[in-house]
C-alpha cells in the first residue's frame, strides 16, 4: 500500500468530496469471452505531468472532461508526486452514464431483447429502468451443415428503442457453433472481400432502420479466446485493424452513419497480452472506446480498480485520448470477497474517478461464473443502491436523433 503524506492525503480528501433465418439474428448467437478467459490481476502506473506544468494542465482540465483534473486525482490515488505543488479543483462534477445489462435467459427462459419481459424482471431487482440493452450475433449460423447469414436485427433493435433504451449490439466475424478454429472465417477472408456482399446488405439494413445503436465489432481482440484474434485461427499481425477498417469502410460507403463504432479490448492488468495500441484502428474509425473486465473471485479476487484502472488509463491517456468510453461487459464473482462491496465501489467510482466512461453494461448471464446481480440479496441490494444515483440515466432515449450516439449530458 502506498504511503501518502499528510498534505497529499488532505488534497485527496478535498478532491473526493467533490440477440438463421427470418429478418433478425437469433438469441444466444455468441457466447461470451469469459468461457475461455484466464486469470487477471495486477496493475501498472501511468506517468504523470511534471510539477512545473501542473497549474497549466489543471486549467486545461476544465475544458477537457476526462483530462487533467481526473489525471491529477488518479496520480494521487496511485501515490505519485505529480502535481503535488498545484492546487487541486475543489470538486469534479460526477459524469452522466448510460447503463444497462446483457440479460440472460435465467429470468424468463429467453434472453432480452427477444423477451422484453426479461428486462422488466431485471429492473424489478434494480429499481430503475435501463438505458442500454446488450445482445449479440455472429455473421452466420453453420450448425445445419450449410451456413445461413444473420441479417440485421431490426425487430429487437426497434423493441429496445421503443422502450426508451439504446441498443448495444455485438457483431462478430465468425459462425456458430463457435470455435477457436474457423478457417472459413479468418480475418484475411474479411479483408479480401469474401463477405463484402453480406456486410453491405447488413449495413444497408442498418441504414434503413435509421436509428442510432452501438456496434461492438470483434471485441476482446487482445485476448486469444476468439477466432478473430491475431495469432489464432491463422490470423496474422496487422490483420485485425485491416479487417475493422474494411468493414467500417463498407458502412461508410452505404451511408449507415447510425452505427456507433465501439472498439472494445479486454482489460489486461497483468500485461499478459499484446498492447491494445496494436489493435487500435485509428481515431477516424472509432467513435467510442470500450473495455470488458471481470473479477473472477477466489484466489484471483481483484477490486474494480485493480481490474480496470491500468488499461483504462492506457487507453484514455495514450491510445485514444478524447474518445468517450463504455464498459461493454463487467461482472464479479461472489467467492473470495464481498461482491456487494465490489459493486458499490464500481458504481461510485465510474462517475467520479473514470470520467471518460459514459456507459456501463453488467453481464447478467450465468456463464462460467455467478455473474448475475441476483446471485445474492446483498449483491442485488448494492447494485440497486448504486444505480439509483442520478448519474445513471434511465430509459429516456426513444427519440434519440440520427448519427452517432452522444455522450449523455
Image (cartoon, rainbow, N blue to C red):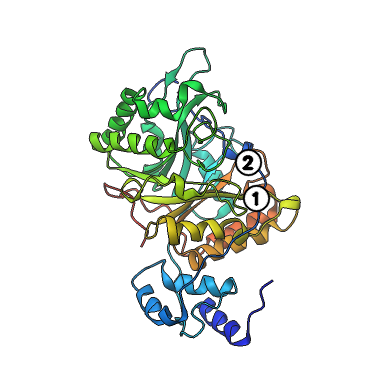
Q: Is residue 144 left or right of residue 38?
A: left
Q: Where residue 226 sits: x, y (%)?
A: 54, 34
Binning the other alpha carbons within 10 Å of mark 1 as few (below 14), some (14 to 19) or many (20 upward) gives many
The correct choice, above or below, for 249 with respect to 350 in the image is: above
Q: Residue at x 65, y 57 (%)?
A: 42
Q: Is residue 395 above or below residue 213?
A: below
**Vertically, is 253 above or below 163?**
above
**Residue 286: numbered disc:** none
Residue 353, x across and y down, in percent:
51, 67
Residue at the image position 40 percent from the left and 38 percent from the top: 159
> What is the total number of numbered labels drawn onto the structure image?
2
Query: Circle 1 is placed at which residue position?
Result: 40
> x, y (%) of residue 27?
50, 30
- 264 or 83: nearer the viewer: 83
Left or right of 236 in this view: 337: right
Looking at the rendering, in which quadrant would you find the C terminus? bottom left
Image quadrant of residue 140? top left
Residue count near mark 2 (Cα–Cα under 10 Å), binned few <14, some 14–19, many ≥20: some
- The local secondary structure at tag 2 comes to loop
Q: Is residue 361 depicted above or below 84 in this figure?
A: above
Q: Which residue of the protein is positioned furthest toward the front in this rendering? A: 237
Residue under pointer 2: 37
Tell me if label 2 and label 1 are in contact, CB under 8 Å.
yes
User: Is residue 385 visible to us here?
Assistant: no
- Asked which secondary structure carries label 1, the reply is loop
Compare residues 16 and 220 and report the one nearer the observer.
Answer: 220
Residue 153: % across, % down: 39, 31
In-image side of 106 versus 387 (left or right): right
Q: CA distance from mark 2 to mark 1?
A: 9 Å
Quadrant where the N terminus sits is bottom right
Q: Which residue occupies the foreground of this view, 60 or 153?
A: 60
- In which quadrant of the rendered view does residue 251 lie? top left
Amino acid at each position: 500500500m502506498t504511503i501518502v503524506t499528510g498534505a497529499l492525503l488532505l488534497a485527496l480528501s478535498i478532491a473526493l468530496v467533490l440477440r438463421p433465418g427470418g429478418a433478425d439474428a437469433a438469441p444466444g448467437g455468441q457466447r461470451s469471452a469469459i468461457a475461455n478467459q484466464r486469470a487477471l490481476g495486477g496493475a501498472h502506473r501511468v506517468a504523470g505531468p511534471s510539477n512545473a506544468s501542473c497549474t497549466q494542465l489543471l486549467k486545461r482540465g476544465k475544458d477537457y472532461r476526462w483530462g487533467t483534473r481526473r489525471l491529477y486525482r488518479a496520480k494521487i490515488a496511485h501515490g505519485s508526486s505529480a502535481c503535488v505543488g498545484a492546487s487541486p479543483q475543489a470538486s469534479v462534477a460526477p459524469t452522466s452514464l448510460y447503463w444497462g445489462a446483457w440479460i440472460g435467459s435465467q429470468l424468463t427462459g429467453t434472453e432480452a431483447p427477444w423477451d422484453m419481459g426479461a428486462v422488466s424482471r431485471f429492473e424489478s431487482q434494480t429499481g430503475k429502468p435501463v438505458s442500454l440493452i446488450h445482445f449479440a450475433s455472429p455473421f452466420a449460423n453453420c450448425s445445419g451443415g450449410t451456413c445461413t447469414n444473420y441479417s440485421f436485427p431490426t425487430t429487437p433493435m426497434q423493441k429496445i428503442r421503443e422502450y426508451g433504451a439504446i441498443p448495444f449490439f455485438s457483431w462478430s466475424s465468425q459462425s456458430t457453433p463457435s470455435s477457436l478454429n474457423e478457417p472459413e472465417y479468418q480475418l484475411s477472408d474479411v479483408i479480401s472481400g469474401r463477405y463484402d456482399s453480406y456486410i453491405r446488405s447488413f449495413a444497408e439494413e442498418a441504414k434503413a432502420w435509421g436509428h442510432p445503436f452501438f456496434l461492438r465489432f470483434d471485441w476482446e481482440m487482445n485476448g486469444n479466446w476468439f477466432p478473430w484474434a491475431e495469432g489464432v485461427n491463422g490470423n496474422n499481425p496487422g490483420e485485425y485493424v485491416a479487417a475493422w477498417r474494411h468493414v467500417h469502410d463498407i458502412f461508410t460507403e452505404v451511408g449507415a452513419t447510425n452505427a456507433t463504432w465501439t472498439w472494445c479490448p479486454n482489460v489486461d492488468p497483468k500485461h499478459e497480452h499484446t498492447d491494445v495500441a496494436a489493435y487500435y484502428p485509428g481515431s477516424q474509425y472509432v467513435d467510442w472506446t470500450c473495455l470488458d473486465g471481470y473479477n473472477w473471485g477466489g484466489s484471483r479476487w481483484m477490486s474494480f480498480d485493480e481490474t480496470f484502472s491500468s488499461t483504462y488509463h492506457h487507453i484514455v491517456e495514450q491510445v485514444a485520448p478524447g474518445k468517450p468510453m463504455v464498459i461493454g461487459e463487467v461482472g464479479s464473482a461472489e467467492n473470495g470477497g464481498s461482491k456487494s462491496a465490489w459493486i458499490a465501489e464500481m458504481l461510485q467510482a465510474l462517475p467520479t474517478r473514470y470520467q471518460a466512461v459514459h456507459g456501463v453494461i453488467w453481464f447478467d448471464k450465468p456463464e462460467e461464473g455467478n455473474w448475475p446481480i441476483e446471485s445474492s440479496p446483498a449483491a442485488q441490494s448494492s447494485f440497486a443502491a448504486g444505480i439509483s444515483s442520478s448519474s445513471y440515466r434511465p430509459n429516456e432515449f426513444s427519440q434519440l436523433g440520427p448519427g452517432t450516439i452522444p455522450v449523455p449530458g
